[in-house]
Structure formats: structure tokens, C-alpha cells
Image (cartoon, rainbow, N blue to C red):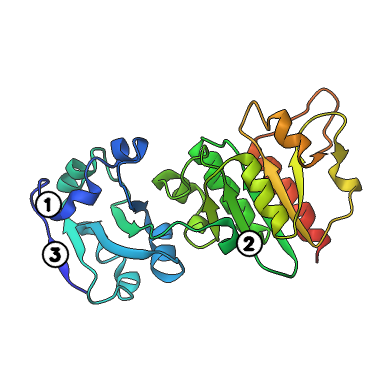
């Protein structure tokens, strides 16, 4: 493993890591994405489907990460710098001292990630622009055996650094595809043989516990606050999670977890 020491924040080799927060917010990484922290780095190196371009570590992290770094391919550059240099490059204090740069590769289509046959649970996300919610939805999908996640083009990128961290690294290996409209997500899921359930607090929606669980089902969730638009609900089967009187909604990731867990346990 080649350890390459960097002493200048202007070192061009560190360009992918420059001003991370600002570039995250403007999608300025292009075909790259940044992973932060030991847990997600381990997932990136051992389980991810994405190619890793380089690592950037604080010099104090080399010894604690020795076992993990032993798995790094010999041709992958590992840049090492002092805490001060690393902070200057990233643009804010990098307390974890662990960064990696991955390559997104060619985008996948829904048909590429949805299983062709057999039991399947898919999670469809329409209009989720909050990185924490997207990351939490991925973590819940992985915990309860979802086959894939589909996101419309207005949802945030699951390979955004914070979304990856909140997902506990599951966004790096759980199959997903992003693009198109919410209606396109429904069409793709139905084309792959899934019955689509639109989660909504509407009183006329069917209660989740009363439903027979099909072998192939897709859960459609909307943005925090407004929820799913009426036209999308009308194109699917409206389903609600029963709650105490006077309270009709929970966080979107929590709703996903409840519904996914119900389906997971019914299939056992």
C-alpha cells in the first residue's frame, strides 16, 4: 500500500477532497463521491459495488486502521497528512480523520436493480430532499431485507457524504436506481411485478395490519411534511399506519421502517 505524504493543502493530488461541504451542497464532485469515517470506509473497501479511487487519512489514523488498510490494493493511493493540512483541504475540522473517494460509475436503471422473479420488497422514494431521511431509509431497507431502492430525480443523491454516513454504509451496497418522476417509479415497480402501496395518513387508506402481503410489493413514500401528491396516491394502493387518535404521521424514515418490518416479519 503506497502511503503518500502531503504537506501542502494546495497539493493537486488532494483536489477531490477540497472544500467537501460546499461541493456536497452543489453536487460538485461530478462522477465522484466522498465517504467519511471508519465504518463507511470498511464497507467501501469490503462490500461496496463502487470502485475506490483513493484514501485521504490523518496521520494519527494510520496505526488504528492498520488491519483495515492491509486490505487496500497495492495500486490504490493513500494520501496522509497532518490534522491541520487535512482540515484546510476539507474546509472544516475533520475529527474522524478518515476520507475516501469513490467513483459512481454508470447509473443503473430500475430494471437493473429490481429482481426479475421471486419474493421482493422495494422501497420507492419520491421527493425526499433531506439527506438524513434518505440515509435512514436506506439503513431501514437493508435492515428489513428490501431488494432495492428506487428514487426519483428530485430526491437527494444517496451517495451524498452525509446520506452514506446516516445509512451506515448501506447505500454503498444495497441496489438502487435514481431518475425520472414518481410516476415512473410506480411504472417500473409494476412492470417488475410489484404491487405498489402508497403510504399516506389519509383516513380512507387501508390499514397496514389488515392487508395480505403479496410476494412482490413496493412501498412508495413522499417527502417529509407534504407527503405524496394526490396523483401518485391515486396510481397506487393507499395504505396507512394506524396511530393513536389525534396523531396521523411519523418521520418518513420511521414510516418506512414500520412498513418494512411488518412485511419482513410476515414473509418469515
* 193 to 200, vertically: above or below: below
Residue drawn at the location 24% of the way across and 57% of the way down: 56
Q: Nearer the N terminus, badge 3 or badge 1?
A: 3
Give the camera-side residue of 199 and 263: 199
Residue drawn at the location 30% of the way across and 57% of the way down: 101
Q: Nearer the N terminus, badge 1 or badge 2?
A: 1
Task: State if disc 2 and disc 1 touch (CB < 8 Å).
Answer: no
Query: In the rendered image, which residue does mark 3 sit on?
Result: 4
Give the camera-side residue of 111 and 256: 111
Residue drawn at the location 42% of the way across and 71% of the way down: 46
Query: In the rendered image, which residue does mark 2 sit on?
Result: 114
Badge number at residue 160:
none
Q: Is residue 167 left or right of residue 72?
A: right
Label 2 crowd (10 A; few <14 / some 14-19 / many >=20): many
Q: Secondary structure at mark 3?
A: strand
Query: In the rendered image, which residue does mark 1 sit on?
Result: 12
State which mark lies toward you, 3 or 1: 1
Q: CA distance from mark 3 to mark 2?
A: 41 Å
Amino acid at each position: 500500500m503506497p502511503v503518500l505524504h502531503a504537506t501542502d493543502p494546495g497539493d493537486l493530488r488532494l483536489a477531490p477532497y477540497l472544500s467537501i461541504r460546499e461541493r456536497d451542497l452543489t453536487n460538485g464532485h461530478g462522477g465522484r463521491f466522498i465517504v467519511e469515517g471508519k465504518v463507511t470506509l470498511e464497507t467501501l473497501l469490503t462490500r461496496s459495488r463502487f470502485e475506490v479511487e483513493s484514501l485521504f487519512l490523518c496521520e494519527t489514523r494510520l496505526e488504528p486502521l492498520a488491519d483495515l488498510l492491509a486490505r487496500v490494493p497495492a495500486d490504490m493511493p493513500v494520501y496522509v497528512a497532518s490534522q491541520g493540512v487535512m482540515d484546510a483541504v476539507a474546509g472544516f475540522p475533520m475529527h474522524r480523520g478518515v476520507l475516501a473517494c469513490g467513483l459512481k460509475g454508470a447509473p443503473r436503471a430500475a430494471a437493473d436493480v429490481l429482481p426479475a422473479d421471486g419474493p421482493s420488497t422495494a422501497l420507492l422514494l419520491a421527493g425526499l430532499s433531506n439527506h438524513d431521511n434518505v440515509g435512514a431509509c436506506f439503513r431501514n431497507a437493508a435492515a428489513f431485507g428490501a431488494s432495492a431502492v428506487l428514487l426519483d430525480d428530485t430526491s437527494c443523491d444517496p451517495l451524498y457524504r452525509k446520506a452514506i454516513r446516516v445509512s451506515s454504509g448501506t447505500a454503498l451496497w444495497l441496489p438502487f436506481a435514481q431518475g425520472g418522476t414518481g410516476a415512473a417509479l410506480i411504472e417500473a415497480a409494476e412492470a417488475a411485478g410489484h404491487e405498489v402501496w402508497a403510504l399516506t395518513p389519509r383516513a380512507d387508506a387501508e390499514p397496514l395490519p389488515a392487508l395480505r402481503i403479496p410476494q412482490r410489493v413496493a412501498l412508495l413514500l413522499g417527502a417529509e411534511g407534504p407527503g405524496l401528491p394526490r396523483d401518485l396516491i391515486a396510481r397506487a394502493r393507499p395504505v396507512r399506519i394506524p396511530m393513536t387518535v389525534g396523531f396521523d404521521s411519523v418521520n418518513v424514515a420511521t414510516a418506512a421502517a414500520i412498513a418494512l418490518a411488518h412485511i419482513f416479519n410476515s414473509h418469515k
